[in-house]
Image: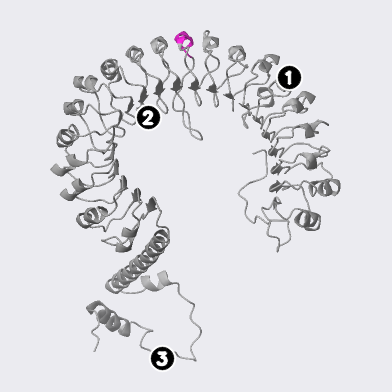
Amino acid sequence: MTKLHPICLFLLFTLAVIPGYSQKKNTDSPPIAKQTHDEWLQSLPTKTRDSIVYLEWKQAVGEQEKEANVAAKARIDEAIANPDLTSLDLSHYPNAELDPRLLSLKKLQRLNLYKAKKLDLQKLFDFLKGFPQLHALSLADGNYSALPSNIGNLTNLDSLNFRNSNIKTLPETFTKLQKLTALNLEHNAYLYDDDLFDKLKQMNVTSLNLTACGLLVLNNKISDIKSLTRLNLSINDIKELPASFAQLSNLTFLDLSQNTSINLSAISNTLSHVSSLKVLNLDECYLATLPAEIGSISSLRVLSLRANILASVPTSIGNLSALEELYISSPKNSFRVNVLKDLPSGVGRLSKLRILDLAGNLLTGLSSDFSQLSSLEVLDLSRNLIVDFPDALTSLTRLHILDLNRNKISVLPASIGNLTVLDSLTIDGDFFSKPDKKIKTLPAEIGNLKNLKKLTLKDNVIEVLPDNICNLINLISLDLRGNLISELPAAFKKLSALQTLDVKSNDLKALPAGLNEMYDLRDLNIAMNLNIDFNIAIPALTKIRSLRILDISYNNITRAQAQPLIDGLPNCKIINIDYYNKSALPQNSPKTFENKPQAPGRH
């Protein structure tokens, strides 16, 4: 006879005496309102409720485990069907041991065991000896308490991810991993760093990640790891670097982001002696100022200062004569963090600078020597307070990407035509600005930008496009959303490379002739153009066979009007949402988007 669990017996007894459970239904009684499951639980005695909740939780966990086992078996079945497989992802593996059938994968090189928390590492490492080509292993987020000594048998490993565990030390055998070059120990807050560095100095690790390891002081033994080229110390509370740090003569990359108590003056002095250092990340360090000493790290190629609270930059930054990339921006879609109001004249001395990101500051203009940045290829000045298009920009003839999104610019000069190698130009208006702070006209010289592939001018007050815009024969994406354009140029079909056209929320009266001859046009948005006669436009749209997405929302198009588009463009997703966010397409149409998250307006 099967024995019942004591909790089950307790529940059976308790439920038997709960009113309504042991009584027969009285057919003469008035109907009782149905209770939800939660309401029913709340009506029970506390101990009974807790027991039921516990059993339900156990049942849910059991179901999850069953699902995990089924999913793991399916992945393994699929894997072993391909004996030439080189990479295998067994994330969330639910068991203590790997399926022995995996040993047939003799060519396996990379194995991901992310969140495989039940694994017996001792057995795992013995098992992995059966994969002679395995060189990359991830045990991230397993919360393991120790590394067994037999990890030393995996002598072919060159990459090990042991993020988010609770180990205190590495076994002595760890030093046998002489091929190991990349070691991720992120979020191992109990790890003794002096023991770690003693082990690593006997190895050949080039990339070491100690993010979020609770480091307050960096042990001076770090200098013994001569092989290091990349070191990540982000999300700690390091204030200074030991003097011996300068002995890391191969170090090229250092991440100190989110160390909010750093003494950057002292750190800069130390790093000035690391002549190999090329990349320094100081994002989110809560830096209000930059010390003059920052200019002493003369070897730098990349300096990142994103999301600090900088109000100024010292002129000594111009001493970084080898600098190629500089990032002093604030995050997108957030309040300003860095608050630079101007740039020092020293910026112009960065003659090798290729990428400059100053997005999300309070700049109203540029430095007097900005035009000397003759190597600049990418410039992001979006989300600033620039009113006049900076003349200095038109001298930067190597620019490929220029972003002036959400400034206060109202006039584009004819000299913008000098930027003939531009691939991407973004000058969106600020949606919340007054019309006099937005662009109303485009100079004819914009047609000189014949290498342009992306042009974005949304949320301005442009009424007419110059005919010369049709000279942009390499244009792939054109975004004119939220303007006042009443017609597109007659020669618009000359933009034969165009794939994406967005003219939502304009005043178009008709579509230009020849759209069906633009054979690469895939994505067309003509929503909120209420002056278009769709009795004429819809037959024309059905001829654009290349379309894959067509948005005709907020144009008061009836279901009957939309039907020819459904029939004529079987491979196109057609979006037709009305002002009540309901589809105006036939209900049986596969092209209907019932809840497109887009409200009417100039978005």
Q: How far apart are marks 2 and 1 (CA)?
A: 40 Å
Label 2 Cα crowd, 10 Å radius (few <14 / some 14-19 / many 20+):
many
Label 3 Cα crowd, 10 Å radius (few <14 / some 14-19 / many 20+):
few
**Main SS of residues in magenta:** helix
| In the image: residue 335, left or right of residue 598 | left
At 37% from the left edge and 70% from the top edge, which residue is drawn? 42
Residue 43 at least partly seen: yes
Give yes or no for residue 348 being in the magenta stretch: yes
Closer-to-camera residue (374/129): 129
Residue 6's disc is none
SS label for mark 1: loop
Task: Give above or below for 227 relative to 7.
Answer: above
Residue 403 at least partly seen: no
Q: Which of marks 1 and 3 is nearer the N terminus?
A: 3
Q: Picture quarter containing residue 312?
A: top left
SS label for mark 3: loop
